[in-house]
Image (spheres, rainbow, N blue to C red):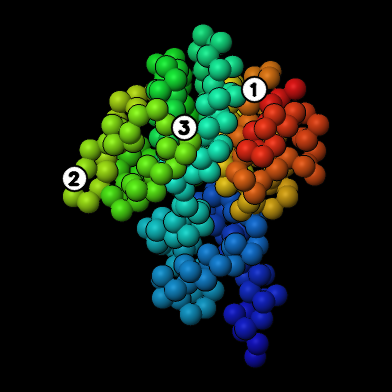
C-alpha cells in the first residue's frame, strides 16, 4: 500500500487536510500559504514531534493545543535581521521620512513583524529622525511567541555584529551600541524605543484593516503566500493606507501581476517601496 509520505501527491493532500483541521480547530488559516514552503515546514514539524507519518502529526496538533502552540513556530517563518537589506532603510530615511515629517502625527503598520527586528530598526530610524514621539507603530503577527520576543527586544549577542553592520550601511547616525545593553550573552534594546508600539495578534489571511496608516512595512512575508493570499494581503495594505501613503515590501516581492498594481506608483523600484496613488 502506498503511504502518503511516499507519494508527493498524497502528501500534499494530507497537508491540505491538516491545514483544514487546524483552521476549523484553532481558526489559524494556512490554507493559502505557498505549497513548497509548507512541505518543508511540515516535515520539520514531523521531525520535531517524532511523527513518522503525517496523520500522526495531525492527531497531535488537533488534540493537543500545547503541541499546536509549539508547532506554530514551524508554520510561521521567524527569519529577520536588524536593518535587513540596508538599502531599504536608507531609502526610507532619505525619501520617505522627509514626507512623513510633514504630518502632525504618523502611523506605521509593521505587518508580520515576527520577532521584532524590523520593528526595532524602524523605531531607531524614526528616533534619529525626530519622528518617534509622534509616531504610533502597530506591530502585528499571528504567532504569540514571536510577539513576545518582539516586545522583549532581546537578541543573542552573536547576532549583534551583523545588526551593527546593517545599521551602518543603512545610514545610522550613531553607534548601534547606544541602543542596547549586554547581559548573559544577549543584547537588550532600550525599551523606550517601543513606548509608541502597539503589539497585536492579526492575521493577513482572515482579519481586516484596523486603522488608517501612513506607511505599511511588510517584508519577506508575501513570499510564503500563494497568489490568492498575496492579493488579499496587498488589498488590506491598500485599504489601510492614507492617500499617497507608502508601502514597503521585501526584495523578492512585488506588486506586479497583482490586481492592485495600478493603484500604486513605483516610488523606489529597487528598494520595493511603493506609493499609493
State the CA–CA distance, disc 3 to disc 2: 27 Å
Specify the label residue 183 is tagged with: 2
Residue at disc 1, secondary structure: strand
Residue occupying the far bottom of the picture = 1
For marks 1 and 3, give the one nearer the viewer.
3
Which is nearer the N-term, disc 1 or disc 3? 3
Which is nearer the N-term, disc 2 or disc 1? 2
Name the residue rendered at 62%, 79% in the picture: 4
Q: x and y percent of residue 234 in the render?
A: 68, 37
Residue at disc 3, secondary structure: loop
Quarter of the image holding residue 20?
Answer: bottom right
Q: Which residue is mark 3?
A: 171
Near-viewer residue (153 or 225): 153
Q: Which residue is mark 1?
A: 245
Q: Is residue 50 left or right of residue 112?
A: left
The reply to whether dot 3 and dot 2 touch (C-beta < 8 Å) is no
Residue at disc 2, secondary structure: strand
State the CA–CA distance, disc 1 to disc 3: 23 Å
- Quadrant (top left, top right, bottom left, bottom right) of the N terminus: bottom right
Q: x and y percent of residue 125 in the render?
A: 44, 28
Q: Is residue 74 left or right of residue 220?
A: left
State the CA–CA distance, disc 2 to disc 1: 40 Å
Name the residue rendered at 75%, 28% in the picture: 265
Amino acid at each position: 500500500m502506498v503511504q502518503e509520505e511516499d507519494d508527493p501527491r498524497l502528501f500534499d493532500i494530507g497537508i491540505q487536510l491538516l491545514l483544514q483541521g487546524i483552521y476549523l480547530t484553532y481558526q489559524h488559516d494556512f490554507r493559502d500559504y505557498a505549497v513548497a514552503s509548507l512541505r518543508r515546514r511540515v516535515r520539520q514539524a514531523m521531525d520535531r514531534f517524532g511523527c513518522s507519518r503525517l496523520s500522526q502529526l495531525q492527531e497531535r496538533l488537533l488534540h493537543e493545543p500545547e503541541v499546536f502552540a509549539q508547532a506554530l513556530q514551524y508554520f510561521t517563518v521567524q527569519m529577520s535581521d536588524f536593518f535587513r537589506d540596508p538599502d531599504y532603510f536608507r531609502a526610507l530615511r532619505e525619501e520617505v521620512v522627509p514626507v512623513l515629517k510633514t504630518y502632525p502625527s504618523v502611523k506605521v503598520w509593521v505587518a508580520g513583524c515576527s520577532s521584532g527586528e524590523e520593528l526595532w530598526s524602524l523605531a531607531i530610524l524614526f528616533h534619529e529622525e525626530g519622528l518617534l514621539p509622534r509616531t504610533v507603530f502597530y506591530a502585528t503577527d499571528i504567532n504569540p511567541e514571536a510577539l513576545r520576543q518582539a516586545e522583549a527586544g532581546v537578541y543573542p549577542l552573536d547576532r549583534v555584529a551583523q545588526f551593527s553592520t546593517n545599521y551602518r550601511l543603512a545610514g545610522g547616525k550613531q553607534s548601534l551600541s547606544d541602543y542596547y545593553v549586554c547581559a548573559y550573552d544577549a543584547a537588550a534594546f532600550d525599551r523606550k524605543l517601543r513606548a509608541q508600539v502597539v503589539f497585536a495578534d492579526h492575521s493577513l489571511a482572515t482579519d481586516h484593516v484596523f486603522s488608517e496608516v501612513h506607511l505599511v512595512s511588510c517584508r519577506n512575508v508575501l513570499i510564503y503566500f500563494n497568489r490568492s493570499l498575496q492579493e488579499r494581503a496587498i488589498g488590506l495594505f491598500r485599504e489601510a493606507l492614507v492617500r499617497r501613503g507608502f508601502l514597503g515590501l521585501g526584495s523578492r516581492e512585488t506588486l506586479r501581476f497583482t490586481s492592485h498594481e495600478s493603484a500604486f506608483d513605483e516610488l523606489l523600484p529597487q528598494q520595493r517601496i511603493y506609493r499609493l496613488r
